[in-house]
Amino acid sequence: MGALSGGITLRRYRVNGSAPKDFKEAYEKSVRAHVLVPINVESNEDKSLGWSSIFDENDLDLSFDKFFFEGHIMLALRQDTLKPPAAMVKRLLKQRQQHIESERGQLLSAAALRDLKAILVAELRKTTPPKTRTVDVVWNLEEQRLAIYSHAKSMNEALLALFSQTFNLGLDIEGPALWAKEQSEHDSKQVAQLKSARPTLELLHGFVGLRPTPHGHEEGAALASALRGELSQGA
């Protein structure tokens, strides 16, 4: 969702490094090696993460022509989760427990209940469809900039790991910190000022009367004052 349809909610990253000259063959192999692998219902895994086509989440046979368009690598970050609903497991477990206990005429032990639950979950995994979540990812190779169309922490963290594994490149989130770093790159005075920067009273304490504050007013003011003192010494 995001790049081709739906709402436009995205987070931008700067790619650390550039694509090699022979990236076509290299990236096709890397992407194919990191496509999503469907969850095996016979295993104990609950989640699977990998790439899929940005045009069809069920297309996992990714040739280069399917994800490279006019200087952009376009993929979907897909995560499958296979976990029977807890309420269903609890309800069915209670039914089976009552049935077995009525047949045997005795209560099941805690260990027997755990084993029964494991058997039930294994059975339900075979009939429970996995929940699929996909997020669009667009990488402009020339500008070395990447956008993921989600602010969700879990998906952004998954992107950082999977992108590094796939392309052997890192990502820096694009925002005030990166912009300030680039702006001051050739100015030693600005570099020193940035290194000595500290949070303001409002960031530490919040705006009085507008929202709950993480510290008491006096505590926040004292902390901010101390940090400003460090800043003055550092400057």
Image (tube, grey):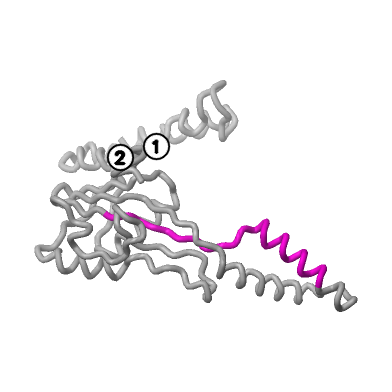
Secondary structure of residue under mark 1 = loop
In the image: residue 105, left or right of residue 219: right
Mark 2 closeness class: few <14, some 14–19, many ≥20 residues within 10 Å: few
Q: Give the residue type at disc 1.
A: Arg
From this viewpoint, which residue is outermost toward the top? 209
In the image: residue 215, left or right of residue 187: right
Q: Is residue 152 above or below residue 97?
A: above
- Image coordinates for residue 144, horizontal then vertical, percent: 19, 50
Residue at x 42%, y 35% (from the top left corner): 199
Which quarter of the figure is the C terminus placed in?
A: top left
Residue at x 67%, y 62% (from the top left corner): 89
On whether residue 90 falls in the magenta region, the answer is yes
Q: Give the residue type at disc 2.
A: Gly
Which residue in the structure is indicated by mark 2?
175
Bounds of the magenta span? 75-99
Q: How many marks?
A: 2
Residue at x 48%, y 73% (from the top left corner): 40
